[in-house]
Image (tube, helix red, strand yellow):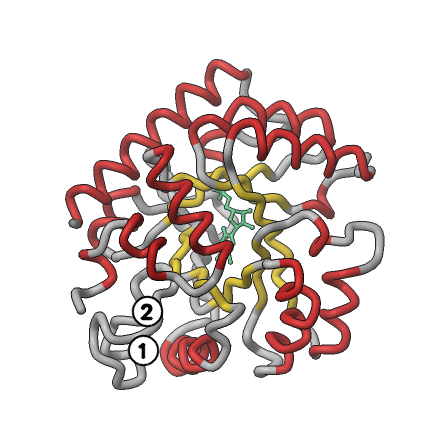
Amino acid sequence: MPSITKRTYTERAAAHPIAVARQLLECIDRKKSNLCVSVDVPNKASLLRIAAAAGPYCCCIKTHIDIVSDFDDDLVAQLQALAEKHDFLIWEDRKFADIGNTVKLQYSSGVYKIASWAHITNAHPIPGDGIVTGLAQVGLPLNRGLLLLAEMSSAGNLATGDYTATTVAMARRHTDFVMGYVAMRRVDEDPKTAGGVAEGEGADFVIMTPGVGLDTKGDGMGQQYRTPDEVINQSGCDVIIVGRGIYGGGDGNPDEKIVEECKRYQQAGWKAYEDRL
Ligand code: 5BU
């Protein structure tokens, strides 16, 4: 089998065992967009406005729902309607990090009921396999997908070396629910972290990568930015995640600026993918 980086998103979609991964990979190809827009704003109106402006240009909108001061169930209903209208998936970047029983409750219950609306969520592997089995009990019946944090984008983070390799091994034990990683490179095909599995022979994991920016290298709080070409073409990741580079911080750029930046990142991400193939 060719290395995953040499397969098209469509080829990968056709062969993927997880429904939501198929949905994402098909959406990427349909829209020619491997752009995920991260919308980290503190109120409902801004979140919905930015999602509406960015929706046509991205495959995924990523939320931090606990940032929103005036959260209510209607926000979720409206976000889901936008996802339908503009054809994108919703990823709640919850970064679960507790034992299976606790994350199961955090995922299904409380104010946010994340599993009821987020196609994708993510978890730190630090508690061990139980975090995946706990989340899977809630997510599998709903056809949700999980990303494991194999690496992070911030300076000095501890998710490196053996930690990353152990995360890849953990993901391979749960290929019915773990659809991919947050990582900075193709960790499942890098000899240092692939655990002896040859290139092109392992399960297909979607690698979604934050820390993407065309204009700056950092944010003064540890974030480190790379370009879409560095992420998709040179490092073999699958989806670029762009937040402030598009919405601009605070309550967000005006719509026209959001659209302009979305187009710029969408084009750069797609060119990097074509160059890699
Ligand atoms: P930015 O505005 O493009 O820097 O936002 C990046 C987003 O990605 C933000 O929501 C972070 O919480 C998220 N993120 C990250 O930046 N780095 C990581 O390693 C992980 C998530 Br995991």
Of 175 and 53, the residue lying toward us: 175
Q: Is mark 1 within 8 Å of ligand 1?
A: no
Residue that extends furthest to the front in the rendered view of this protein: 14
Q: Are marks 2 and 1 in contact (CB under 8 Å)?
A: yes
The percent coordinates of residue 222 (x first, y second) are: 48, 53
Note whether 145 is above or below 173 in the view shown: above
Q: Residue beneath label 2, please?
A: 187
Q: Quadrant of residue 98?
A: bottom right
Q: Amino acid at mark 1?
A: Thr
Q: Which quadrant holds the N terminus?
A: bottom left
26 or 32: nearer the eye? 26
Secondary structure type for disc 2 = loop
How crowded is the residue under tag 2: few (<14 C-alpha within 10 Å), some, or many (20+)?
A: many
236 above or below 47?
below
For the point 66% across and 64% down, the residue is: 141
* Residue 19 disc label: none
